Image (tube, rainbow, N blue to C red):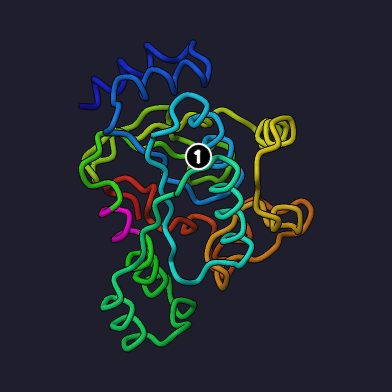
């Protein structure tokens, strides 16, 4: 599979984002979806994808601990594009066990606790959301953090056994916001309050000028740990 992915990347390396999306939307019609965090990058992709196909599956994960502003942009997006985004929730039994084991905010006590919380709130629902698909689309950009510097346009997701494409992998933050402003794309108002990266409310803070754009995510941890597990490859810690 690695050889096939390498060939696909070589084939698409000169293509622009419209050509990349068209290639995968046409080839994997009905078996492809955008996994949206409702962040700026995923809002750009939502706009681009729905221009090409109004019926593409777009889903998000409601962890149960999101900001009110995140729910607002979900509503704004549904209304603007006349869609109903699919929403996946954690299994309530898992959350009950999580609270019983570590308490409501036990995720701050250790990286292991936090990853357990991320697994139950994000990874397990994601597996359900990706079930039956061949391709998932993400809004990852290489410049977002040191954990994403080696990511490619097209990758093989061993954990979920499907292709993952990152159409914005080479985009800058300026590219993202230029697109949003030029195309009147709905966005999370927290972005204008110092939140470049937005996750669960208790795990996200605003950042100061000059800080890394992922500094506000799990700010009590070292930078190399700042992934929830959705985009880690097998063997990564």
Rendering quarter of residue 29: top left
Q: How many marks?
A: 1
The answer to which of 50 and 197 lies nearer the viewer is 50
Q: Position of residue 32 (x, y in %)?
A: 32, 34
Question: Which residue occupies 65% across, 66% down?
Answer: 205
Question: Which residue occupies 52% across, 21% down?
Answer: 17
- Is the residue 31 above or below the residue 82 in the image? above
The answer to which of 26 and 198 lies nearer the viewer is 26
The answer to whether 77 appears left or right of 120 in the picture is: right
Q: Which residues are magenta?
A: 123-128
Q: Position of residue 45 (x, y in %)?
A: 53, 35
The answer to whether 149 appears left or right of 230 in the picture is: right
Question: Which residue occupies 65% across, 35% down?
Answer: 176
Rendering quarter of residue 181: top right
Main SS of the magenta part reads helix
Query: Image quadrant for the N terminus?
Result: top left
Q: Position of residue 4 (x, y in %)?
A: 24, 20
Q: Position of residue 228 (x, y in %)?
A: 42, 58
The answer to whether 74 appears left or right of 210 in the picture is: left
- Is the residue 152 above or below the residue 237 in the image? above
Query: Image quadrant for the C terminus?
Result: bottom left
User: Would you name the residue on which mark 1 appears?
Assistant: 139
Question: Which residue occupies 33% across, 50% down?
Answer: 236
């Amino acid at each position: 599979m690695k050889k096939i992915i390498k060939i696909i990347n070589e084939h698409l390396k000169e293509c622009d984002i419209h050509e990349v999306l068209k290639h995968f939307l046409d080839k994997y019609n009905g078996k492809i979806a955008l996994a949206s965090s409702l962040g700026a990058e995923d809002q750009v992709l939502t706009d681009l994808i729905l221009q090409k196909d109004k019926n593409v599956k777009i889903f998000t994960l409601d962890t149960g601990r999101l900001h009110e502003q995140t729910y607002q942009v979900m509503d704004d997006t549904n209304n603007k594009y006349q869609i109903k985004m699919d929403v996946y929730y954690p299994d309530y039994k898992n959350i009950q066990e999580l609270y019983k084991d570590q308490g409501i905010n036990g995720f701050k006590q250790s990286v292991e606790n936090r990853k357990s919380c991320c697994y139950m709130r994000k990874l397990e629902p994601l597996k359900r959301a990706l079930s039956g698909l061949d391709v998932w689309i993400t809004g990852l950009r290489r410049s977002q953090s040191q954990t994403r510097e080696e990511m490619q346009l097209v990758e093989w997701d061993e954990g979920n056994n499907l292709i993952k494409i990152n159409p914005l992998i080479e985009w800058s933050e300026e590219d993202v916001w230029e697109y949003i402003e030029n195309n009147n794309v709905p966005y999370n108002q927290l972005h204008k309050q110092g939140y470049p990266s937005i996750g669960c409310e208790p795990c996200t803070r605003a950042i100061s000028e000059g800080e890394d754009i992922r500094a506000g995510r799990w700010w009590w941890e070292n930078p190399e740990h700042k992934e929830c597990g959705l985009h880690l490859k097998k063997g990564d810690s």
